[in-house]
Image (cartoon, coloured by chain):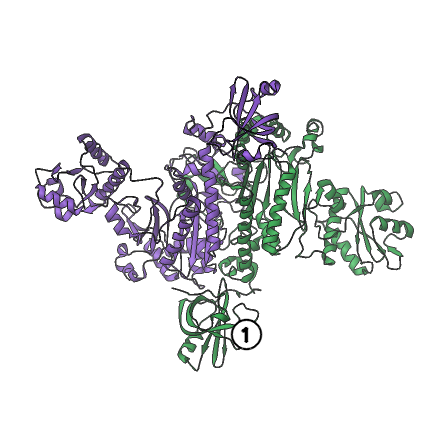
Chain colours: A purple, B green
Amino acid sequence: MYRTHTCGELRFEDSGKEVTLSGWIQRSRDLGGMTFIDLRDRYGITQLVFNMETDPGLCRKARQLGREFVIQAEGLVTERSNKNPNLPTGDIEIVVSRFLVLNPSVTPPFTIENESDGGDELRMKYRFLDLRRNPLKENLLLRHRMAMETRNYFNCHNFVEIETPFLIKSTPEGARDFVVPSRIFPGQFYALPQSPQTFKQLLMVAGYDRYFQIVKCFRDEDLRADRQPEFTQIDCEMSFVHQDDILDTFEGMLKHLFKTIKGIEMDRPFPRLTYEEAMELYGSDKPDLRFEMKISNLTSIIKGKGFPAFETAEYIGGICAPNCSDYSRKQLDALTEFVKKPQIGAKGLIYIKYNTDGSVKSTIDKYYASDAMIQWAEQLQAKPGDLILIIAGLKPVALKALCELRLEMGGRLNLRDKNKFVPLWVTDFPLLEWDEETHRFYAMHHPFTAPKPEEMEKLDIDPAGVHANAYDCVVNGVEIGGGSIRIHDEKLQEKMFRLLGFTEQEAKKQFGFLMQAFLYGAPPHGGIAFGFDRVVSLFAGEESIRDVIAFPKNNAARDVMIDTPSGISEDQLNELSLKIKKDNPAN
Amino acid sequence: MYRTHTCGELRFEDSGKEVTLSGWIQRSRDLGGMTFIDLRDRYGITQLVFNMETDPGLCRKARQLGREFVIQAEGLVTERSNKNPNLPTGDIEIVVSRFLVLNPSVTPPFTIENESDGGDELRMKYRFLDLRRNPLKENLLLRHRMAMETRNYFNCHNFVEIETPFLIKSTPEGARDFVVPSRIFPGQFYALPQSPQTFKQLLMVAGYDRYFQIVKCFRDEDLRADRQPEFTQIDCEMSFVHQDDILDTFEGMLKHLFKTIKGIEMDRPFPRLTYEEAMELYGSDKPDLRFEMKISNLTSIIKGKGFPAFETAEYIGGICAPNCSDYSRKQLDALTEFVKKPQIGAKGLIYIKYNTDGSVKSTIDKYYASDAMIQWAEQLQAKPGDLILIIAGLKPVALKALCELRLEMGGRLNLRDKNKFVPLWVTDFPLLEWDEETHRFYAMHHPFTAPKPEEMEKLDIDPAGVHANAYDCVVNGVEIGGGSIRIHDEKLQEKMFRLLGFTEQEAKKQFGFLMQAFLYGAPPHGGIAFGFDRVVSLFAGEESIRDVIAFPKNNAARDVMIDTPSGISEDQLNELSLKIKKDNPAN
């Protein structure tokens, strides 16, 4: 037997027991006559002690043990004279009588501590060592508990977990597929699923009523910090439901997770904003509602009063930063620089200081009377002492800049508390988006999303004006899930593909199986998918989903630890009837 | 709201309630003045009734509804005059006041009944309809419950579910990989995992101690009835354990599943046989222990007594079929034909009837005295009335034939009861297998399996004679899981790769990351993987794993429903720097 107890288990009550522990050497300290070793495993740390007086031979051997050696130690649980209240095992130590090196370790390339001295690339290369650090370990244990609680919730609500296939069909709609060449059918390919969308709809047609799955999905896209080529989805679908049934069920899921994992009681129902409201009030379809600071449309009251930059603007909007009227010139210049950054794109920033004495001071003093500016301030519900920030321009550009400015101010004012969680639903998304480049409509959610029944007739005359029963779940400004009521009528699905520019033949080739299924009694249905990596990183308080994934890829979709992707043999290529094109102009 | 209740929910106590149900029309019967419709959903069937006298308009409309139409019906829960005790809802019916067709259905290509009239291919093509049938639905619900209970067991035993990556590295060892071309790195590939083996070992190095995952794995092999290109594994690994700790933990898992899912109490510990014992006694490393009928080695007592076929035989073995001494000539001929089939390969079959009167009658009467034959019978613990069946030949061939004959006789004698479950562990597998064709050793389990410590020195002098702490879990003659204690020493792992014919460079290129990880304090560890599809099919009493998979592939690894694999566009090929070879001689 390698151990009688784990390194996180022994307490004062265990004093006097002979025990055996196994684990890694976290650190060791030689204090004259004594040597102390912190022995670590997944469950905690226990102090081992060796005494130069009572057993000099053993103590000398112990002093040769290096960091990260794996040892097995036998000894007596003893009350510590110098207790450590920060450690659950801090009341005791093990007076070691015998130990064995199970495996030595060369010196790790970085320190295995909460804050490591290793850079990103190095820690990715030695991920198996990085995963020994507490923060990553806690994240993976959290992820496990969240997966368990998610499944428990669905199981209790009559959902069935059903595995959908990974070797499916490539469809050019949506993001780029990863493909898998078939050996048996030369020149043919499978694709890895971007989501189980069509299969979960088929499960509804098959009558399964409430489906869920925590499932890997794949997208061959160029990566940003919060994307991975393979990612995990909480994927769900329900039959015989309206939008409210779905929102209600998944509010319940989040409430359950917040309660069981973080001990937080969420109020229900979650706030709901339509897409248009969210854009108007926050300049974003994923607003951070941890703080107010809504955007006000000032166009009608400001425009036409003489300031040139305002006269030509399509839109003028402002936010009110509370208690910031004493911002210095330097601070205001920094905000102006911020909104003028290319990725934000505002032309400039106008401020009005609504001073504590009730006076106003602004960039545009000479164009507007104080009274007028006080009137704008009131429109923004500003109080004396607040700072008004105004941006003008094309409406989408100005709103985006105001959104970014709002988040920046929320950050500066410490209104974005990591330990506060404010969810909302954004609903009523437009069904379609027009793409100027390819001159066609794209589905805003996906081609299976149903138009709102009351707007069905607009499909023929004003498709861009049609909305969908599509919804996103947003927490703290992060979109963690989204879904829609689906089309379950074959004729409507055909029409949708036509609107999206599919020929009848293309639609049939790619999605014929789904349209055929709709002919055999498809129930009304809808669903949702949550980004599990994102939900976990939200709970963990991590910025990047990498920190909640055991073995993530880097930004070039590469696993630097196993050094992959990599070459395969000529034999493998031959079996797959494939040849590599050299000097491919596409790359 | 589409429904107030499901179709499986209403009981006599609900009589008098106004309810709304939604579901599929299973069947309808017009009986003069009344029309009865069975409305079906996932939860059950409820009878709807329409009365020609009280509402002829509605009744006429109802008579136009076809099989598999999806309808919503409102009405009054009423006690049935003609109760159906076979149906949980059989005490009531709904007197319908209003209904709505939610979606019509064309006539299904086969009947949606427990026994369908559709052939295999047709039902695969319309899998979304086949999945409506009760037997498949029950299998998928069973699979869901088994996955939940499996996770509950591991969670309660401190295992952490950790997701391992799907886009990993191709390694030619083992079965053939499915590969995924990289777009960003032209000419390079990922591979889909055949198992998370190396990653779970890295998790042990990282200190996670007890890992599990229910995870999809992939093998590009030519398929047999019980294989799929993508399949699901219960995958586990543990640190600081010996073989017994692992067997104990997973006996516990199976016991938990049998108890919670089937209400069966399994005795523990499970029987254990070494590989050699299993081969000697049952001719198989996965014996069906639902019945005895052990093989006896009769070589030494039979050989050298004159019957020519026995004189040249390396091995002579027999089994005793109880109460079969009255087998007819025809029955015995059939058994002889059976063992002579090419896939079984015996040269012939000798029988000895040990008649109820104590006399014997045999194919080889003229070569042996009755007394001798009675002595053999006693060696086989035969009683009067039993039938002795003897096969001679090369030892592996004769044992294989005896194994098949034993299973055949077990079947004929109804000793292989589907509702009886007898598990065992087969242990001490040989570490290596010699392959005559490629003239090299292959790992019997995989290259990461540790030799038995006490046989370590034999590695250099007699590698074929070395055993491993490798074990299989067998239930009713089906191998449902297998695993081993792993190598955790870098030098030993290097030596193992050398024995398997890897150059140092190949080993480093393919598994360098693992050997490097072993340098940084790898704990002793071992693990196991269960074939989840097989475990579920065992519990479901199904012959094929296809019947417990929602969307399986056919024997050509093809999904005939979505018609995949299929072609991809030139653009996709170009982005991946790939060309299809036409007329590939390899295919």
Q: Amino acid at mark 1?
A: Lys
Residue furthest toward the bottom?
B53
Counting every numbered tag in the picture gives 1
Any part of residue B152 in sight: yes
Quadrant in which the C terminus of chain B is drawn: top right
Image height of B123 relative to B378, above or below: below
Q: Chain of mark 1?
A: B
Left or right position of A118 against A77: left
The image quadrant of residue B219 is top right
Percent position (x, y) of residue B402? 76, 49
- Check the picture and name the quadrant holding the N terminus of chain B: bottom left
Residue sitting at the far top = A32
Q: Tell me residue B499's x, y (percent).
A: 64, 29
Q: Position of residue A39 (x, y in %)?
A: 53, 28
Q: Residue at x 83, y 43 (%)?
A: B299
- Give whichever of A403, B220 is nearer the camera: A403
Task: Give me the residue at 57% from left, 50% from top.
Answer: B533
Counting other residues with Cα less than 10 Å from the Cα at mark 1, is it few (<14), some (14-19), or many (20 or more)? few
Q: Position of residue A441 (x, y in %)?
A: 30, 51
- Displayed quadrant of residue B544: bottom right
According to the picture, the residue beneath numbered tag 1 turns out to be B83
Residue A540: image quadrant is top left
Considering the numbered disc 1 on the image, is that residue within a helix, a strand or a loop? loop
Task: Give the residue drawn at x 55%, y 63%.
Answer: B118
Residue B234 position (above or below residue B50) = above
Is residue B225 at all visible to an observer of this figure? no
